[in-house]
Image (cartoon, helix red, strand yellow):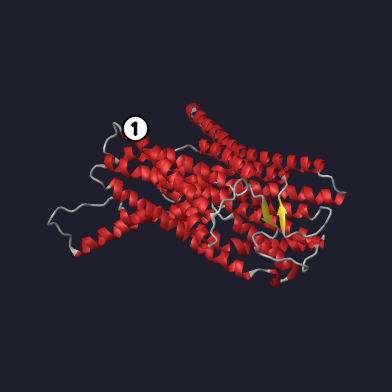
Amino acid sequence: MSQPTKNPEHRYINDLRRHDFIQAQSSRLLSTIMPLGMALVFLIVVAVVVGHSFGQTREGVFLVVCSAVIGGYMALNIGANDVANNMGPAVGGKVITITTAIIIAVVCESAGALLAGGDVVKTVSKGIITPGNAVSVVDFRYLMLSALLAAALWINLATILSAPVSTTHSIVGGVLGGGIAAAGVGLVNWVTMAKIAASWVISPVFGAVVAASLLYFIKTRIFQAEDRITAAKKWVPILIALMAAAFAAYMSMKGLKKIWKPNTLEITAFAVTSFGLAWLLARPYIARRTAGLKNRKKDIHGLFDLPLIIGAALLSFAHGANDVANAVGPLAAIVSTLGPAGEIAGKVTIPLWVMVVGAFGIAVGLGLFGPKLIAVVGEKITRLNSPRAYCVALSAAVTVLIATTLGLPVSSTHIAVGAVFGVGFLREYSENPNRRKLRPGHKLNATADAAFNSRNIRKSRYLVRRQFVWSIAAAWIITVPATAALSALIYGCLQLL
């Protein structure tokens, strides 16, 4: 007896499902391969251009090309991982889209790197090691190459695992490990290392406290006021002026070192002047924006949109000016040893072509791989809106200013992510999802009260996703040891070649 034929309609539906599945898998594979291919093209272009333009012996050209490719690889990873700290909150607050954030960040990061990028960097990366006569020129080159590759590999791994890490700490760990492998622990400046270890706690705690304090001020002075419109007209211009003053001081101290090197009095005068001008301009702007608004929190949120976008752009400019040295500092150190003197200098001027590799590498890395970490910082740790994201951006500038004034080493990555956590934990403390208001005189019995509180505590924990707390904290703690061990291993392999 013959088997009954299948329903043609069912067969057609199964074919459609199979086709959709294959198409989805192909699109996913293509979206993974395309960025990797474009990144590879960028590194090949770097190798070809540097190889043709750098006049040296065959050995020198090979070393410079390898160093430039690794420097470009490091810059790609900085763009993929570190820039998310500046743009993530604005995206998470639904103020701008990821595409807009990438465009702003690419322009500002590149401008910061090329216009105000590190004019002079210490060849040993912020005083971590003091080579002296303990390391030969050849070993020093291998040391820096190992540090650069180790840091790049670690940041790449952290990006894959969706963990924003400090690029500064990554390169510091690389130099530390390579230095110990080259000449032992006596080469290391342990006082500096102790300060860096302290910053693992100082940076996120400072960022969290400042961001939470700003958000608490906004909640109590504006959102909890009976007349929110009047309160916004009074306090939002002051908050905008505070951001202007903070960024004026931040840019003069950290972001414009190559263009302008002011003293303390000039920085203070610049900040105070910026505060006054911003306040005068913000008052009519806020008055126009509040005209016709309803007395609702949602309407007030929009007042923070433009200041947040400007703040994120300035943070990206300052980041490009400062952190490009993490990508190309060791590269510049290697190039300096190939000069006529052929020796290890105490300080190294970064050549323009090296800065271009760093600037374009950061921009390309951000465009190809940045959206993943932008989504983590802006959306997955805790839910942000415009005022919360504004507090994160302002916290980054204020915290760096306070830490710099006190002489404390801090990481911009740790500050920004710590600020996001601070905002989230304040929400857990002050807000309670599904809070039930009791009628006057109504009391719960002990069992019901305990169950009610327990349920609300459990729900409030979801305001900050705990898995990101532990994974990011673990990544921060092991960044320096991991890159140090990897750098020492790479240095040992180079010695065997």
Q: Which residue is mark 1?
A: 288
In this rendering, the count of numbered labels is: 1
Q: Is residue 274 left or right of residue 260?
A: left
Give me the residue at 69% from left, 58% from top.
147
Q: What x and y, as percent, mark residue 475?
A: 55, 59
- The quarter of the rendered structure image containing the C terminus is bottom right
Q: Is residue 180 above or below residue 429?
A: below
Q: Nearer the viewer, residue 257 or 377?
A: 257
Give the left or right position of residue 353, taking residue 428 as reference: right
Give whichever of 333, 153 is nearer the camera.
333
Front residue of 354 and 248: 248
Q: Residue at x 28, y 43 (%)?
A: 231
The extreme bottom residue here reads 186
- Residue at horizontal 33 percent and vertical 54 percent from the top: 459
Q: Position of residue 122 (x, y in %)?
A: 68, 58
Kind of residue sitting beneath label 1: Arg
Q: Residue furthest left?
A: 441
Q: Residue at x 77, y 40 (%)?
A: 49
Residue 333 picture location, percent across and down:
73, 55
